[in-house]
Image (cartoon, helix red, strand yellow):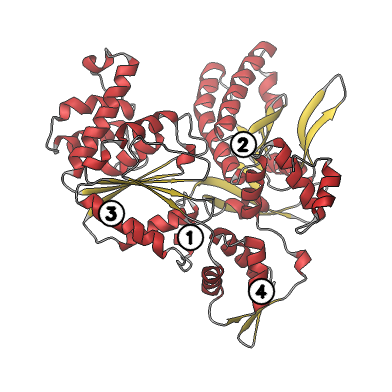
Amino acid sequence: VLFADVANYTSFSEKLDPEEVHQVMDSCFRLLLEEVHRFEGTINQFTGDGIMALFGAPLAHEDHAQKACFAALSIQRALKNFSKQIKKQYGLDFRMRIGLNSGLVIVGTIGDDLRMDYTALGDTTNLAARVEEAAKPGQILVTENTYRIASDYFEFESIGLINFKGKTEPTEVYRLLSPGKALTRLDVSLAKGLSQFTGREAELQTLGNLFKKACNSRGQIAAIVGNVGVGKSRLVFEFRQSLPRGDYLYLEGRCLPYGSSMAYLPILDILRTLFKIKDGENRNVIYLKIKDYVSNLDFNAEKILPAIYEMFSLGIDSSDFKQIKPRDRRKRIFEAVKDLLGAVSKKITLVIVVEDLHWIDKTSEELLKYLMDWIPKNRIFLLLLHRPGYMFESKNQTFVTRIKVDDLSSVSSLKLIESILGDGEIDPELVGFILSKTGGNPLFIEEFTHTLLEDGSIVKQANRFLLEKNKSLFNIPDTIQGIIASRIDRLEDNLKRTIQMASVIGRDFVFRVLEKITGMRDEL
């Protein structure tokens, strides 16, 4: 839950005409709406001087806390220019305070026939509002709940314990500063230390064989398919670690859940790596890096440079390119990317990875399809990582290999648990309990096992790991809750409702009981 309001709004509004206040706030609300929607949030309330926004409702997201943090940072960034305009026009300061909290809420409509509001109720919402009130102008404050979920991906500063009205205990509060270095779960794992890689020997060998073909000018495409948490990115990481140094150039692009409207998003990631463009570099530096790199390749650089400049929105004037119709301009961009990658692959084998293809923007998807039939003639190995349900089709499938990454076997799951717990014998009851809750999903196994360790549910006695607490008291880690809730929310309504009713009965149930409470028979 995110709350944002204008600091010192009463003083600000007293110094302007009501019409001017309306104009300022209307522009401000449009800015807030754009930033919240960009990160898949929902504004459910507009107040006179602020908003209440929800992330993870009405549809659950597996990374709702991260999206809320990104939205909050993006709002404050956008407000800097907006505040300068207000200062210049009216001579007044305009800054906002933002508060975030994560937790369970009751979501739905409240009111009567004359007025109905969609909102979230509960202690989580109340605390988010209190945290926002405690923030200074321009600050973003979060609760410990949000910090715990998002701390691996953002930089925070501890504010300390604050006593809030209505709370019996003080609340730990943190200030959100900036995005962190970690972008993915794999980045987080690398920073903390990787667990044992197990159960993927066949998949790793397949990737190695495909790479050898690509090195011999028989380009290959590997579609790596699996549910969230099964280890698609880890498989690619281990594949890269297995390759001889210097025999390839590794390029990676990432699709984002909120990036479907951002043209060429993963392709630009790939090209930034190719041109060695760093975050924060200005347009002139980017322009020179692109020009220098392309000019050193063995082909007509002037033919493709205007198209590459256009992709990076550098605003470089090219009268010839600007006169082309938009559709033909896109074709020129596609050709430029193909020619560029082709020229590089003559010097060295390219390993190109596109992560989370299920979130790809339409333009990038069309560009990849444009390259499909061309790849087999070049030293290029393209790896496409996506979840089940997304299909990347090609007319010619002879050079496309589909690698399905499933949950781990019981034997591999045990090896993973052993690597997490360390030296010592593991009680079979503990192993069975973990596997019954995680189903062999590597991410779930890691998160759940670490949670059991942190809350003291796993104890070590006489060099033997045992389950300590009553099993009914275990909490599902926040990361797993978000993933499961997100998958359930995206099911068809009837199936979603059936699963919810079945969950009330329990993990094991008699079909007749489910049939009775749902009122369905043939549909089940």
Q: Quadrant of the C terminus?
A: top right
Q: What amino acid type should be assigned to the residue bearing mark 3?
A: Phe
| Location of mark 3 (residue) | 211
Q: What type is the residue that disc 2 sits on?
A: Pro
Q: Mark 2, residues whose alpha carbon is within 10 Å: few (<14), some, or many (≥20)?
A: some
Residue named by callout 2: 137
Name the N-terminal-most of marks 3 and 2: 2
Q: In this view, does 196 lie above or below 488?
A: below
Tell me the mark number nearer the camera, choosing from 1 and 2.
1
Say which of marks 2 and 4 sits in front: 4
- Residue at image location 75% in from the left, 55% down from the top: 170
Q: Residue at 65% across / 79% down in the picture?
A: 427
Judged by depth in the image, the label closer to the viewer, 3 or 1, is: 3
Residue in front for this viewpoint, 15 or 500: 500
Q: Which of 93 and 479 is in front in this view?
A: 479
Q: Give the Cα separation between the discs numbered 1 and 2.
A: 35 Å
Helix, strand or loop under label 2: loop
The span from disc 2 to disc 4 (Cα, nearest Å) is 50 Å
Whichever of labels 1 and 2 marks the residue nearer the N terminus, that label is 2
147, above or below 140, in the image: below
Q: Is residue 9 above or below residue 65?
A: above
Res 377 quadrant in image: top left
- Pointer 1: what residue? 189
Q: Mark 4 points at which residue?
A: 430
Task: Tell me which label, 3 or 4, sits earlier in the chain.
Answer: 3
Q: Which amino acid does label 4 sit on?
A: Leu
